[in-house]
Amino acid sequence: MSKIAPHLLVLLNEIVEKHKLGLPLEAVLTGGQGLDEHERELLIDALVFEFTETGLHADDEPNERGREIETLIDLLGASRRP
């Protein structure tokens, strides 16, 4: 997985705390490295929920937060590939 920008790590940590996922902080801060498949799915589900709740303009186009959440989802999904 490529290195995650600091502002995206802040957003990722915010979402983990908001959804009370109880994931290992180190694993979250490395963008999901060290998470098992179940933990990664929980994190992606929380990101998708957050995207639908806070990441869209009224016309359903992603706002800035939505684009950042999409980036996190892409990075987490990429970390699952061999």
Image (cartoon, helix red, strand yellow):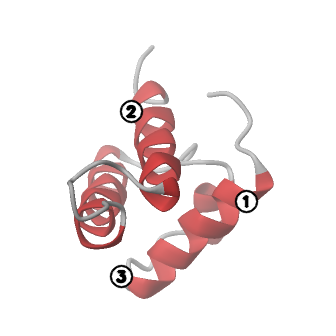
> Looking at the image, is mark 3 or mark 1 nearer the viewer?
1
Q: Which mark is residue 19?
A: 3
Q: Which mark is residue 34?
A: none
Q: Secondary structure at mark 1?
A: helix
Q: 19 left or right of 24?
A: left
Q: Earlier in the sequence, mark 3 or mark 1?
A: 1
In the depicted view, which residue is nearer to us: 25 or 2?
2
Percent coordinates x, y for residue 9 in the rendering: 67, 59
Q: Which residue is at the far top? A: 82
The crowd level at tag 2 (other Cα within 10 Å; few <14, some 14-19, many 20+) is some
The crowd level at tag 3 (other Cα within 10 Å; few <14, some 14-19, many 20+) is some
Q: Earlier in the sequence, mark 1 or mark 2?
A: 1
- Mark 2: which amino acid? Gly
CB atoms of marks 3 and 1 within 8 Å: no
Percent coordinates x, y for residue 70 in the rendering: 41, 44
The residue tagged 1 is 7
Q: Is residue 10 above or below residue 18?
A: above
The residue tagged 2 is 77
Q: 14 left or right of 5?
A: left
Percent coordinates x, y for residue 18 in the rendering: 43, 86
Q: 49 left or right of 80?
A: left
Q: Residue at x 70, y 43 (%)?
A: 4
